[in-house]
Image: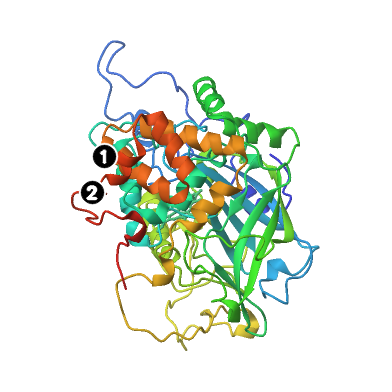
């Protein structure tokens, strides 16, 4: 067993089991004498129901699988630590961002979004980049991706997006690629997805190694300092190895030869002492500057151009240890964008707000019990004391007589922490509004940043985008979907649309004349189409 290197590691070590040179036992600790043969009525007779050893072994095996994640099912993870370069006290009171001498343990899970647990690592897809910081103030999860924006602006569209992305329901094809009708049908009806589509069709969606991807928090979050002043913040991870990709041709060959290419690369790098590192960066915008941009900071389909707000590198993360057990750690880890510490808060980004509901909800099904926070990989190093009780698989043995608060009976019940004692308080943002189901006008420019991204690419990178779109749309059976998509591309870059149209054998005028859809949306003009107008 490896030696503990930090508090979290010591905690995990306390749950480890080492079977080497031990007697084989049942789950009740009974030593097993014969693990090769079941109990039978005679040498050639039927097996006996009383064979509790056979029954226990098979029953446990029968229940070994848990549901895979509804998205991001394919993943790999590693342990490590984070250190801040200098105190971030002017911007946030988060304790793990104060002391450069302090090493905060982390567990990081990388993933693809669409494929199932056994899908190929080299699929054209977004990569998840989820970091759990085990801080002294509780777990802080930064659940990000390797692309700085997202497909949709409002969480209510997420189930639609994923239903369109995942294999088609009648035949479960294709496994892990976006090249199919349902995906492009949906996307071509969703102008807000165009910025993300540019990233996904670019080389960014085909990483050379997980050690060479950037990470982004995507949403705008808030830092709050000791004085209560708020800063909008965008989070970045910048790999010290730089950002590198493979070509589509390479990706396809690697997928065939080694579907575990990224998993193996990460594992072997860490085993051989080549520890991957990322610098942690922030873009900070004082609260009073919220409306100084041409886009809305709450819109997750927009990034803050680094020319406008440079990324300040504030610390470094090193991944230096592989998990001991894939299921116990990588599979059972439960990230949640709502796991916060004092000094960090949400914004009203409507995508983020929906995510805050989704993660615990899905984990209740995936991990099967309201006590999944007690699973070793999810357990904070900060002490946990509350009046939550019981439920499936409860491990904690609460020994006080009472489980409510306020309370004068037991004398031992946990009490609330004042702010000065580290008690979490939400940022006291002033909100004055009518309740409304809709979207702000400030979310309606869907093409400027898509164009910005396309223009930021070198010529060969632009050609890769053309090739990717030609391949993807070439696999779409419905011609009206291909045409509708060409119309979208026309609004991003006319040359891009023309090249893809040429590859598809479609004339641009015929594409531009194509009504978007017979029914939804009825409007023929993509650029002015908005799903809901407030
Ligand atoms: C995983 C929902 C948007 C990053 C998941 C899971 C769900 C989910 C249900 C599976 C969690 C589990 O089983 O433990 C949603 C919803 C979204 C959304 C409803 C929008 C409304 C995003 C965005 C990002 C993101 C914008 C990136 C910023 C991730 C990552 C994982 C994940 C990295 C994998 C976590 C892991 O490695 O275990 N999401 N998601 N999601 N999501 Fe989201």
Q: Secondary structure at mark 2?
A: loop
Hey, which quadrant is residue 1 in on the image?
Answer: top right
| Mark positioned earlier in the residue sequence (1 or 2) | 1
Disc sitting over residue 382 in the figure:
none
Asked if the residues shown at circle 1 and circle 2 are in contact, with their CB atoms under 8 angstroms apart, the answer is yes
Residue at (51, 46) in percent of width and height = 199
In the depicted structure, whether residue 234 falls above or below residue 208 = below
On the question of residue 123 being in view, the answer is no
418 over 278 or under it: above or below: below
Residue underneath mark 2 = 517
| Residue furthest out toward the bottom | 408
Drawn side of residue 112 relative to residue 526, left or right = right
Quick one: 193 or 5, which is closer to the camera?
193
Residue labelled with disc 1: 480
> How far from the left and from the top, in percent, is residue 374?
50, 57
Q: Residue at 67% across / 82% down in the picture? A: 226
Report the front residue among 426 and 202.
202
Q: Quadrant of residue 356?
A: bottom left
Crowding near the residue tagged with mark 1, few <14, some 14–19, many ≥20 C-alpha atoms within 10 Å: some
Total labels drawn: 2
Residue at the extreme left of the image, as rendered? 519
Task: Measure how far apart labels 1 and 2 are at the Cα level.
Answer: 8 Å
**Residue at 45% across / 39% down in the picture?**
27
């Amino acid at each position: 067993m490896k030696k503990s290197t930090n508090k979290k590691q010591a905690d995990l070590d306390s749950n480890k089991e080492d079977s080497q040179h031990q007697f084989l036992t049942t789950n009740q600790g009974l030593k097993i004498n014969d693990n090769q043969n079941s109990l039978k009525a005679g040498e050639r007779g039927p097996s006996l129901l009383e064979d509790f050893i056979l029954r226990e072994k098979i029953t446990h095996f029968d229940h070994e699988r848990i549901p895979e994640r509804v998205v991001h099912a394919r993943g790999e993870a590693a342990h490590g630590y984070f250190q801040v370069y200098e105190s971030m006290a002017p911007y946030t009171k988060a304790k793990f961002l104060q002391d450069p001498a302090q090493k905060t343990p982390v567990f990081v899970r990388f993933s693809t979004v669409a494929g199932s647990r056994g899908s190929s690592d080299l699929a054209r897809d977004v990569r998840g980049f989820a970091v759990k910081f085990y801080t002294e103030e509780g777990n802080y999860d930064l659940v990000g991706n390797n692309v700085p924006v997202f497909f949709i602006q409002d969480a209510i569209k997420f189930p639609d997006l994923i239903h369109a992305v995942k294999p088609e329901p009648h035949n479960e094809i294709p496994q892990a690629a976006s090249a199919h009708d349902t995906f492009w049908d949906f996307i071509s009806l969703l102008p807000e997805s165009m910025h993300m589509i540019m990233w996904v069709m670019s080389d960014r969606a085909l990483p050379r190694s997980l050690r060479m991807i950037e990470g982004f928090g995507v949403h705008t979050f808030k830092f709050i300092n000791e004085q209560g002043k708020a800063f909008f913040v965008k989070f970045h991870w910048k790999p010290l190895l730089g950002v590198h990709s493979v070509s589509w041709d390479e990706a396809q060959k690697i997928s065939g030869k080694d579907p575990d290419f990224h998993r193996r690369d990460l594992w072997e790098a860490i085993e051989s002492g080549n520890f991957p590192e990322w610098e942690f960066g922030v873009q900070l915008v004082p609260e009073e500057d919220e409306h100084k941009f041409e886009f809305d900071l709450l819109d997750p389909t927009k990034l803050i151009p680094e020319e406008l707000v440079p990324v300040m590198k504030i610390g470094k993360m090193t991944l230096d240890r592989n998990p001991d057990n894939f299921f116990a750690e990588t599979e059972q880890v439960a990230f949640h964008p709502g796991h916060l510490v004092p000094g960090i808060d949400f914004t009203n980004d409507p995508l983020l707000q929906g995510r805050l509901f989704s993660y615990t909800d899905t984990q209740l099904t995936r991990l099967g019990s309201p006590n999944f926070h007690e699973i070793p990989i999810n357990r904070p190093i900060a002490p946990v004391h509350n009046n939550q009780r019981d439920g499936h698989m409860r491990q904690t043995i609460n020994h006080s007589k009472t489980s409510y608060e306020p309370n004068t009976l037991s004398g031992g019940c946990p009490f609330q922490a004042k702010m000065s004692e580290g008690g979490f308080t939400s940022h006291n943002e002033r909100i004055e509004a009518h309740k409304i189901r809709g979207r702000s006008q400030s979310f309606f420019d869907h093409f400027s940043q898509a164009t910005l991204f396309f223009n930021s690419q070198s010529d060969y990178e632009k050609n890769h985008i053309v090739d990717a779109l030609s391949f993807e749309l070439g696999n779409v059976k419905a011609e009206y979907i291909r045409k509708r998509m060409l119309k979208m591309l026309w609004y991003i870059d006319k040359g891009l649309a023309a090249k893809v149209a040429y590859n598809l054998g479609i004339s641009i005028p015929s594409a531009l004349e194509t009504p978007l859809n017979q029914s939804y949306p009825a409007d023929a003009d993509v650029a002015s189409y908005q799903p809901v107008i407030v």
